[in-house]
Image (spheres, rainbow, N blue to C red):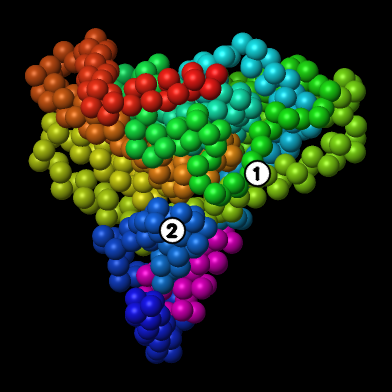
Amino acid sequence: MKNKTFVGLAALLVLALLVWNTAVTPGTIADPESYTCLVYGTVFSLLPPLIAIVLALITKEVYSSLMVGILTGALLYANGNLELALNTLFFNTEGGMVYKLADSWNVGILIFLVILGILVSLMNKAGGSAAFGRWASRRIKTRAGAQLATVLLGVLIFVDDYFNCLTVGSVMRPVTDRQRISRAKLAYIIDATAAPVCIIAPVSSWAAAVTSSVPEDAGINGFTMFLRTIPYNYYSILTLVMMLFLIFTGMEYGPMLVHERNAALRGDLFTTQDRPYGEGSEQAGTGKGGMIDLVAPVLVLIVSCVVGMVYTGGFFSGEDFITAFANCDASVGLVLGSSVALVFTFAFYLLRDVMSFQDFAACVPEGFKAMVAPILILTMAWTLSGMTGLLGGKYFVADLLGTAQALQYFLPAIIFVVALFLAFATGTSWGTFSILVPIVCHAFPSGEMLVVSIAATLAGAVCGDHCSPISDTTIMASAGAQSNHVNHVSTQLPYALTVAAISTVCYAIAGVAQAFLGQSAGLVSSLVLLVVAVVLELVVLSIMRARTGSRNTIKENAEAWQ
């Protein structure tokens, strides 16, 4: 009781100070171009995302945590003036919530989410998901088989991470539910085959974003550089290796072990009381459709999204396929592709007589409602990222990276950690490597060290994005698995940090190796270093497996109920 009284008094005191400060300071900015807040470019510029992340992990509630982080950022930018803070929160042209929602790229992603939600609702209503669940249940008899099938589908859908998260989740959820795989584990597999796969796939929206991040005056072909970074992208490759190790050995640790035990032994797929999407699996559909009613829309969705992306890049205006992908607008392409898939699905179901027009119309609001949670979180995550940008967080990180120039051969490891931290704090991997890649190109104008350092930037950005609870990919992995978001973050974090620690060591080894190899470094040396990285990870995981003693805990108990 005393603690509550103290907190209440402290809150009243802070509010009183803010009201007083508002009364004695202007509530508008006279000259926006010259205005800077007191904490601009300092370590305090990263305070809003850190507050949001810590609160989310403590309270297990993401909406209020994000809002507190946003309010903190607005107050810091306004130097404590409440009037200016409110105007900043909603109407600032660089970071305000209204302007984030007015951004065409962001709105495109939200429309894509809604259309995917409608498509999932249609496939369930028609019975396509249930038919696939029945087909898969006859052929997939083990937990390992269900997880491997999820990984395979995630790897095959390499075009875009948003598309990956929601499609893999909607297709594989009935299969994993039947095999009593926890929603947290499904969310981890989805998340680990989204960004980590897209960042090593030459034909993806991520490849296009990386290519465009290389400065035009750097004298480097962006796409060629991206291809050369693939063998050095340790975090992404080692994440895939770790998933396979966990699946084949049945090893789990950390909070994930609790979730998997509850799922395998008690049939509780959620562990916590929160059931954000209800209790049941979607496979209990009542439609009369068959597997073709799931496979055909998904295939059309994949093809039309690829065509939509290269269309925005000028493929049909004479550009070659690779250049078109490098210049594509992923937001526009995904909206166009998903719209084509929606029209196709409507016509296809009507022709097959598995759905009436009234059923189709009913699925539209149902699909939208299914996406309300990720839309809310994405909107607040974008606003929080905008607040961090207003406070100059990227410049603080850039200066921090610049002070490490003396440690040249350890710079890839340092860059990896800095990129990880920046992506974790801001929730954006694209924003992270768009900031750091030009800095790296300036530090290393040419040579294999440039390739290693850019790869470390991309890997660190993906790692931070993978760990961050405010990352849009993490949010949509939770939505795709229909898992409690905080459960997904808390169970995934130990796995991601394990791979991150191994990757840091690997980048230190790669950086030092360049000192000895010099000009002779190339593709062969990159592949040798990749083999060393994989062997190192397998050794570490094998030691952990022996020490935790959990290698048969899930596997044997799961076999018992089967």
Label 2 Cα crowd, 10 Å radius (few <14 / some 14-19 / many 20+): few
> Disc 2 residue type?
Thr
Q: Quadrant of residue 153?
A: top right
Q: Quadrant of residue 545?
A: top left
Label 1 Cα crowd, 10 Å radius (few <14 / some 14-19 / many 20+): few
Residue in the picture at 53% in, 34% down: 266
Where's residue 58, x and y in %? 39, 56
Which quadrant holds the N terminus?
A: bottom left
Tag 1 and tag 2, C-beta contact below 8 Å: no
Q: Where does the magenta region start and end?
A: 76-99
Where disc 2 sits, the SS reads helix
Circle number at residue 382? none
> Disc 1 residue type?
Gly
User: In screen coordinates, is 23 left or right of 217?
Assistant: right
- Along the viewing direction, whichever of 122 and 91 lies nearer the viewer: 122
Check if residue 95 falls in the magenta segment: yes
Q: Which residue is mark 2?
A: 59
Circle number at residue 278? 1
User: In screen coordinates, is 241 left or right of 476?
Assistant: left
Residue in the picture at 53% in, 22% down: 561
Q: Is residue 53 above or below residue 210?
A: below
Check if residue 81 falls in the magenta segment: yes
Where's residue 316, x and y in %? 65, 22
Where's residue 537, x and y in %? 26, 22
Residue in the picture at 22% in, 51% down: 399
Residue furthest to the front: 560
Residue in the picture at 66% in, 33% down: 281
